Amino acid sequence: MNQQLLNFKSRWVETWGSYSNKTKWLIGGTFLFTLLLLLFLVFWMSKPNLTPIYSNLTPTEAGEIKGAIEQKGIPVEVSSDGTTISVPNDQASDLKVSLAAEGIPKSGNVNYSIFSENMGMGMTDRQFDVVERDAMQNELSYLIEQIAGINESKVMITLPAESVWLDEEGDTASASVVVTRDPGAQLDQGQITGLYHLISKSVPNLPVENIVIMDQNGTAFDYGENQVDTTLSSYQQQQDIRKGIEKDLQKELQQMLGMILGQDKVVVSVITSVDFTKEKRTEDLVEPVDEETGEGIDISVEKIRESYSGDPNAIESGTGTDEGEIPNYNADDPNAQGDGSYEKVEDRINREVNRIHKEIEESPYVIDDITINVGVEPPVADDATTLTAASIEDIRTVLKNVVRTSLSESDVPLEDPALEERISVFANEFKGRPGYVEPQPGFFQTMTSAVPPWVFYAVGGGVGILLIGGMMMLFRRRGRKEEEDDYMEFEQSYSAPAPAAAPEDHYLPREEREVDMTPELLIGKEEIESLAKNDPEEFVKLLRLWMNEE
């Protein structure tokens, strides 16, 4: 074992000594850099993955939570603004449950539970009134914060002093409320009226007139239960109706296109112009029944036909009117000429037309114009060409049908050129999806984002140099082995019997053995010439051996 270690050491020293100083420095620097990189990776992998468990904290709450977590021996990290607490991801759920069981964080607000916790004989009436008012304010603030659109509220209540006289009317209480609305949230008149009633019914002897409510910007909310519809409220109603129409159209298109392309692959924007004009009119129209002839329908028809024909000479004299004769007609007139023919035709027709009476009250919510924009993320997000033209054309066809139906009551032409101007479809990568949570990066992605690119280039270069150096050493060692094999082959084939070595020579290295290997003793001239003619490859090996020896 020791002999093998010595041989390995000698080979290592020999190999290291064969390198130049530049190569030695390069190998040493690469080894040191690789070692530092491994240490950095080990440090990075050992760093815990933190996740936030509390946010929007006050400094007092953040300090309380941080101290409780540190007492449990768990690493904790506080954000730069002091409002967010982060702990290791694998312990986040258990830690939130355990802190909640301990009642942490404590908000510091007084509520009605203080009476059951601190009820005792040492509390004076004055102290009791103060605690009761604080508890009432905090409970009322908590109720107000449950309303949608309100993020935070502060309540200040002034309670009147109790009178000792029975016949004296007591004073009324008053309340001032400041609410912090969510970004973009609007409170309608119904919600404001509900706030007034909530506050009035929560505090004894508090009329609505003694309540003042305003938001964080100083905008006051007036109690408007008995107010008439003002211009501002009408405008708000119209905007709500318009937004409702746009939201319904957007929802239907988003749902339909999302089922085809994917819910996170399409976004729809709808903008409408709505006519809120109210119109009421009465129309009395007269129209023919038959539009082709312009005539009405026949109500009554009377037709009269009268005709007479005969010879005057054949009439016998007599008194009166015979059968078939016309009364008061002188049939025996000698001056009559011809055959005595007579005919009379008379038609009496009463017709009636369509009489239409209309009382029209047009709806005030008619869509005058509409614009629909659709963004589609291609199958390959960063390559817009992966979304085919046929798919885009299908989407445009759907949008044109929606626009045609929406504008059916307006005066907008419904031809394809007019519809094309009101729709647009574009393909692009979505870089800001609302509510979209990006996947947590893996270790390799985190490492690549944290380490500068030149570090990877340097590591790659160092690894390449090590591979090239190793291959060169391997080829060099293989060449030496081939030369030694050739030398042994020629030594066995062409060398004369050498004198027996002394016993002690077997324990000496090969280089120190006394062996006469001159060309004159190995082979003769004729044998060399014969070898060159018959076996050129062996002759070349022999020449290479002699050159190495020299």
Image: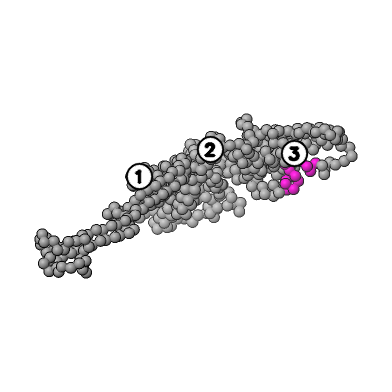
Q: Residue furthest top?
A: 218
Type of secondary structure dominating the magenta stretch: loop
State which mark lies toward you, 2 or 3: 2
Q: Earlier in the sequence, mark 3 or mark 1?
A: 3
**What amino acid is at disc 2?**
Ser
Q: Position of residue 397 (x, y in %)?
A: 38, 51
Cα–Cα gap, marks 1 and 2: 30 Å
Q: Magenta segment range?
A: 98-114
Q: Mark 1 highlights which residue?
A: 413
Q: Position of residue 132 (x, y in %)?
A: 79, 38
Q: Pointer 2: residues within 10 angstroms few (<14), some, or many (20+)? A: few
Quarter holding residue 422 = top left
Magenta stretch: includes residue 105: yes
Magenta stretch: includes residue 421: no
Q: Nearer the viewer, residue 167 or 350?
A: 350
Q: Earlier in the sequence, mark 1 or mark 2?
A: 2
Q: Nearer the viewer, residue 50 or 507?
A: 50
Residue in the image at 21% along x and 69% along y: 323
Kindly identify which numbered label has been placed on residue 162: none
